Amino acid sequence: TGGSVRQPASFCGIVGVKPTYGRVSRYGLVAFGSSLDCVAVFGRTVGDAERVLAAVAGVDPRDATTLDRPPLRPLPAPASFEGTTIGVPREYFPLDLHPGVRAGCAAAIARMRALGARIVDVSLPHARYAVPTYYIIAPAEAAANLARFDGARYGARVAVEGDVRALYRATRGQGFGPEVRRRILVGTYVLSAGYHEAYYNRAQAVRARIAADFTSVFASGVDFLFTPTTPTPAFKAGEKTDDPVAMYLADIFVCSANLAGLPAVSIPIGRFEGLPVGGQFMAPHFEEAAMLAQAATLERHLDATLEVAA
């Protein structure tokens, strides 16, 4: 929905692939953010993840958001990056980017350049608004989607004395964890009378601008974008439990692809003090096969187990 496969893939040193919105059916899943949700794939290698994605992709008459496109057919990884233009968005390399992540990305970019890639500096000027935009739209859609789980129509029911309102409170209070409740509350707030225009409608307008930035960059001759997957290597277990905003900010490089509906893949590009560092490719809509072929080329020519020097 906002990087929940690419981010853990980066932290764990494996591959995570998010397809184009509408590439894979979501029939049978619990909806969270209807305009953002994608079925995504983990794999030890790019080839592993690509084979699974090819198996699950396709139109589904039971999911109106799937699009009738030709089957996803894996392409062989080219021997080099000759003839490929890779855009490096400057907004994804802020001054406070973790030095280990910066070093890993620099090594990957240098390797692609050595293999014949044309590396160009590009700008996605509205990228800085991606996190606040996502954390307005996603909770709003979550609040609407999860309203049905009230103990009367869907989901578990908690036995409680009292009226139907007591049933709703007990069921939803025990059935949803703290983060889910937090997002439902935020989403209900931004959709409420008096705040809908100020928050939700404005976020949708910014979302359109974020998507337009990507369209403009790809139309300028850039084949793929390369960015860090996460702003830091993996943090310690429980380190950010009491700071949800810090957790949300970790999505800064991954949630834009969901807002724009683009395909993206995270691959391991090195290690910093033993912790994996991930790099992310993003591509135009429905260009998964070409994107994954280039990611496999970098995977083949880059030893992701090597330590990077900050």
Image (tube, rainbow, N blue to C red):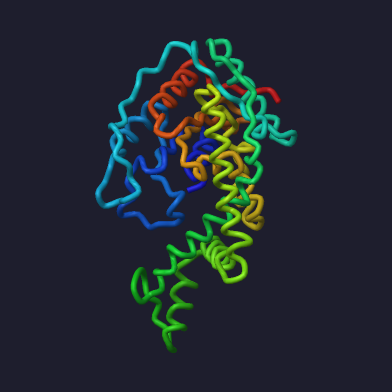
Q: Residue furthest right?
A: 95
Q: Nearer the viewer, residue 226 or 99?
A: 226
Q: Is residue 294 left or right of residue 105?
A: left
Q: Please count the marks in the image.
A: 0
- The vertical placement of 181 against 261, above or below, is below
Q: Is residue 74 left or right of residue 100?
A: left
Q: Is residue 228 left or right of residue 143?
A: right
Give the x, y percent position of residue 48.
36, 29
Residue, x 49% and y 12% (percent of image)?
83
Residue 253 picture quarter: top right
Residue 289 picture quarter: top left
Give the x, y percent position of residue 265.
47, 32
Give the x, y percent position of residue 135.
58, 54
- The vertical placement of 183 against 59, above or below, is below
Give the x, y percent position of residue 271.
59, 28
Q: Residue furthest bottom?
A: 162
- The vertical placement of 101 against 148, above or below, is above
Residue, x 58% and y 64% (percent of image)?
196
Residue, x 41% and y 38% (percent of image)?
20
Residue, x 53% and y 22% (percent of image)?
221
Q: Quadrant of the C terminus?
A: top right
Q: Nearer the viewer, residue 70 or 103?
A: 70
- The vertical placement of 297 against 237, above or below, is above
